[in-house]
Image: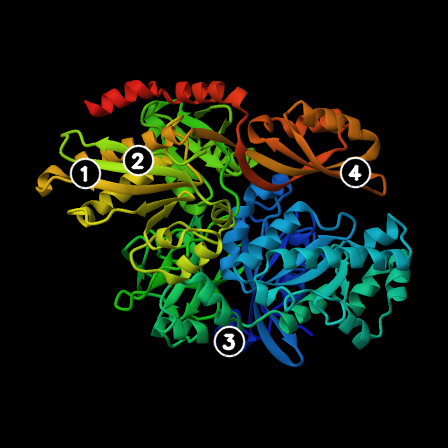
Amino acid sequence: MYLALLYAFGIAMAKDLSEVMQGLMTNVSHIRNIGIVAHIDHGKTTLSDSLLAGAGLLSQELAGQAVYMDFDEQEKERGITIYAANASMVHTYRGKEYLVNLIDTPGHVDFGGDVTRAMRAVDGVIILADAVEGVMPQTETVIRQALRERVKPTLFINKTDRLIKELKLTPEEMLERFRKIITEVNILIQKYAETEYKDAWAVSVEDGKVAFGSATKKWAVSVPIMKTHGISFKDVIQLTEGGREAELAKKAPICEVLLNMVIEHLPAPDKAQAYRIPKIWPGDMESQAARDMIACNRNGVLAAVVTKVYPDPHAGYVAAVRLFSGKLAKGQDVWLSSSKKTGKIQQVSVWKGPHRVPMEEVYAGNIVGVVGLKDAFSGETVCMPDQKIDAFESIKHIFEPVVTKAIEPKNPTQLGKLIEFLRKRAREDPTLHIKINEETGEYLISGLGELHLDAKVERPLKDEGIDVQVSSPIVIYNESAKTQSPAVEGKSPNKHNRFYFSVSPLEPKVYEAMVNGEIPDQEIKRKNVELQDKLIALGFDRDESKNIKVIHNRCMLLDMTRGVHAILEVMELVKEAFQEAMNEGPLAREPCAGVKVSLMDAKLHEDTIHRGPAQVIPAVRKAIRAAMIQGKAFILEPKQVIRIDVPTEQVGGATKEISNRRGQILDMTEERGLTMIKVKIPVMEMFGFNSALKSSTGGLGFFSLVDVLYEPLPKELEAKVVSQIRQRKGIADVKEEDEEEDE
């Protein structure tokens, strides 16, 4: 059933890999770009091993043990996937060869940024769900990530053998278990999919979009396979109970079942790009570039996106690139849209797990490795220098970094090495935010969790021999305004320019759409009817919707002035000052959120020389911050919504730990002696929670992240928190700052 492509442990194959790949890459309808996504420990990497073994890239005996796609030493040591990994394989379906470009993704929420970036590269996913654990919080997250990029799902219910051997379920109970998992997955698809895909992308057993089996034992079945191979549900149970899973794996090999499902139900690049390009590319849909991308034209305008950048000891940096149209070849000059730089392609390749196989050329519709894009980063748009195109939408993770640490070298002579290391890490993983605190000289690193910072920064620093001092975790708060402020005046240092700003809270539905990624950060340079209509539908004022200049940090700048002399000449400076003010709010210089800033009026000096950056920016920044104070500025604290799974007899220990940390129980359900508690806890109270939960539940409780949200900090805590933040940052009192700015 399969065409082996490589020398598998010394056995020579019939065709050379690069020749086979080169031919298949040109047949767009026979290409599938897929990701494997799931909650942590649901079996993604084991499944990847089994698929690679089926394609001849790995020994069948080693599949499931080799963790072939976990090629970093940390991954093997920790027993979890940290980095998304690529592999290309060939599968024969109904007598025809198909090229499958696969990405194995991490399951831990702290490494979810890799999942988000992988979703830009693929067109379909296999969602794994543990048959025993069912749909878990990270299952919901990965479904949400896929649907945001219009990536079509299928479902594999893994570890089915545990239902038979461990839980001793009857066939009826097993079927009920499957129905429950399928229903929960479809509820999530209904929740997060756009209207036209809610029903079309639902998964069902009858049409073959669902399979179940065991990645470890290398077998899987689906309704089409059961009919074709004459396997009944009873056979599956008998063979599993009798320890004859090897026999079952021969009758229904997992690689055949799942890759058949992929070919049958997940789209080819040309089909997927027809509906994905309008979602992820903001350019003119009538342009030649758009037509080429929608048609996946390998002879068309070059349009590609870098989805991952990682270091290679031999090649420098390797970029994982999804080609939407055109082709790439060694020696070719390309243009990097966001970096505004030219790059030269040194090598193009496809992946065989941790290894790359060089190619002559690579074509539209494929995920490829590119060497030579030294200035590229995840989300960068690649095109031709003489055929420049609009940049693709930025790849934005659904969760913001909520944990920050200050880091500085113990030995000042290593400062240069530290700076270079942090610059590389931020480029490789954009969910890591690096910022220098100019007052203290510390470098602030922000990530999705303590494990994220440890695995991606602290541990690699030790490996590099850079000795650093790392602070305790710091929480990043947000600042906002409760009410509309009056128009507040800001005077330029030379007193020749005056700006009048009013601040108000954003409409709740508009802010919610921003949080959900439906309204991204952007600069409005020309009339945007689509955005205006969306905002009006969410309750935004029609006149105000026409005057938006910038959306930044989930805040808006509006120009509500009328007939002000030279306002257009200073607008770029006003935008810059607005962004600075939203990056550092008035109370504790924390980022702002949910704020609508309106420029109501301005009085400007007639001479350009008297209204330069040194005059405009401080005046605007000060006026906005003062307006926020007038609008009753307050602090929003980040909270994590988590699910705690604990044996019912240990619930008391878990709830005690929740109440000790200002936690709020949202829901509690019990099933088969296991209680699931949905809880909301402030991030500042979450440090050390994992070990405390283990301690209070006899080591049997564990938790998973469901969501991150911001809510007002209790008033009785606000003054203390603001004081601590200002002291940590070395910030003077507000009045002293204002006096310094006036001087």
Q: Which residue is mark 4?
A: 675
How packed is label 4: few (under 14 Cα within 10 Å), some, or many (20 or more)? Answer: many
Element type at mark 3: helix
Mark 2 or 3, nearer chain start: 3
Q: Is residue 48 visible?
A: no
Element type at mark 1: helix
Q: Which residue is mark 2?
A: 487
Above or below residue 321? Residue 597 is: above
Q: Which residue is mark 1?
A: 613
Q: Which residue is mark 3?
A: 28
Q: Closest to the observer: 113 or 524?
A: 524
Q: Closest to the observer: 172 or 421?
A: 172
Mark 1 or 3, nearer chain start: 3
Rendered residue at 34%/23% (across/down) = 412
Mark 3 or 4, nearer chain start: 3
Q: Can you tell which quarter of the image residue 505 is in?
A: top left
Q: Amino acid at mark 4?
A: Thr
Rendered residue at 37%/28% (across/down) = 629
Residues at marks 2 and 3, CA–CA distance in whole angstroms: 58 Å
Element type at mark 2: loop
Q: Closest to the observer: 15 or 700?
A: 700
Q: Is residue 527 left or right of residue 100?
A: left
The percent position of residue 68, horizontal first and vertical second, equals 61, 53
The percent position of residue 686, horizontal first and vertical second, equals 60, 29
Q: Is residue 610 left or right of residue 532?
A: left
Q: Amino acid at mark 3?
A: Val
**Closer to the observer: label 1 or label 4?**
1
The percent position of residue 177, horizontal first and vertical second, equals 82, 55
